Image (cartoon, rainbow, N blue to C red):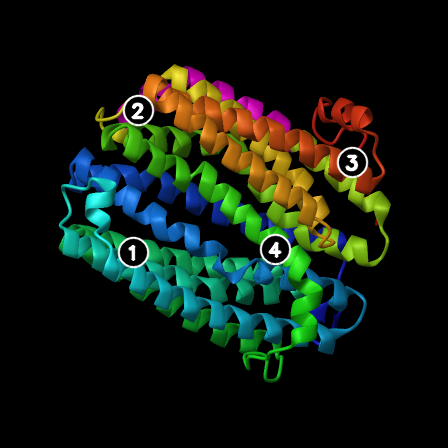
Amino acid sequence: MTVGGFDRGGVGPRIAAALGANIAGRVLAIGIQIATPALFLWCWSVELYGEWLVLTALPAALAASDLGFCAAASNDLTIRAAKGDAAGAVAVFQSGLGLVLTASALVTVLVVGVVAGCDVSAMLGLNSIGASEVRVILVVLTLQIALGLPGELLLGGFRGANRFAEGLVIANALTVLDIVGTVGALFCVGTPLAVAIAALAAQGVRLGIMAVLMRRRLGWPGVLRPRFSLADYRRLLPPALGFASVPLARAAGNQGMVILLGLLADPVLVVAFTTSRTAVRLVSTVAGLVVNSISSELSVAWAGEGRALLRALLIGAGQVTLWSGLAAALLLVFGRDVLARLWLHGAVVLPLALLLPLIAAELANALGRVAFIVIAAANRHARTAFGTCLLSFGGLGLAALLIPGAGAVGAGLAVASAEAAILVLTLRTAGRLAGIPPGFLLTRLLVPPFWGVRLPS
């Protein structure tokens, strides 16, 4: 049944619908991840593609510029809606919208000023792309990231209304628009600047369509009117900063590692590292589906003191994540040569010495994401998130020591070490909050998926 725009149907149907939408979105994302390197290497040289990856890594780190308020507001409005406070949930959404629009504008102005005053091309040692073009590309990509921040909050509105599956279906359809624009620019024009402009245009269209559909489908009067509430900002600040540190940690492990390899090694190693990391994403595919599908239900469980549901979801999701990840890892290890020939046209290999530490890192990351979402669903994740951020930067420091001697393999070992430490932190915290002793939790994760795990009605 729907009350004030918030769906109060059963837990099972909502999880099933969200899982189906997530599977479709994941299949689409995997297709894009697989096709993107092949398409770019078809049109560009390895050196040019390596420099493009370095450039796109810089503005991608700005995804944290909303300071985590999008995620914190989404959880808060979901909890309020579950308690029957629909008006309060809408007010929280409006406060988040006002903040994220302001943050997007400020960050864009800041980046434009920095790029105008620095020779970024010389700093990064770029040769295939001209210095003036590098500046324009960075500004365009920054605008694209800025437009994407309100889009995340709009999807959070669907999640808070317990219509997350519907929001995902819309987002998946718009993702197709994004990739069509990018690939069209790549093949029709072929320059890095044209690709960046196409991505920006697609992001703008995506934001407009999502906003219109949200207002019409959810029927929230005045929902897209920004609101500024210091009381909301003060209350959401601790969990928001915790969420802000998560993309910062990801930037350290992903974009930061790419930039470090570009500085300490060369663009060819950057391509080898990024393609290998793309391949091992298969290990955490199920984890991403599970986490996105249960996040709303976890917030609802926290609102209703449903600890039994929390424990069941934590154990069941962990089991599925671990066992599916191990199966995918075996497939990658034995099929890496065939994958490299079919996927990368033989231009780049997938060495076992690099794949193994990256697979271990991805397994740890997958389990850590399951544990973290249990903590974050109640906005109780600030300390865990800050610890995760520190450990990620520690991995970046370790990589700086290993890359000069071991190259991309050294970067892989650093990533694996950081992810293992993060997993220990998140599992202990999630187990404590859900009322599961650490030893018992680890024992249950080793059991095949869903044996003995039942979801409370």
Q: Which residue position is annotated with label 4?
A: 241
Say whether disc 1 or disc 3 marks the residue closer to the N-terminus.
1
Determine the secondary structure under disc 3: helix
Discs 4/1, front:
4
Residue 147, numbered label: none
Q: Which residue position is annotated with label 3?
A: 431
Query: Residue 203: image x %, image y %?
Result: 37, 63
Residue 180, numbered label: 1
Say whether disc 2 or disc 1 marks the residue closer to the N-terminus.
1
- Residue 329 in magenta stretch: yes
Determine the secondary structure under disc 2: helix
For the stretch drawn in magenta, the main secondary structure is helix
Query: Residue 171: image x %, image y %?
Result: 47, 60
Query: Residue 273: image x %, image y %?
Result: 35, 29
**What's the distance in space between the residues labelled 2 and 1, CA to CA?**
24 Å
- The residue at 61%/74% (across/down) is 95
Name which quarter of the figure residue 275 lies in: top left
- The residue at 67%/77% (across/down) is 91
**What's the distance in space between the residues labelled 4 and 3, CA to CA?**
22 Å
Q: Which residue position is annotated with label 2?
A: 340
- Residue 85 in magenta stretch: no
Say whether disc 4 or disc 3 marks the residue closer to the N-terminus.
4
Say whether disc 3 or disc 2 marks the residue closer to the N-terminus.
2
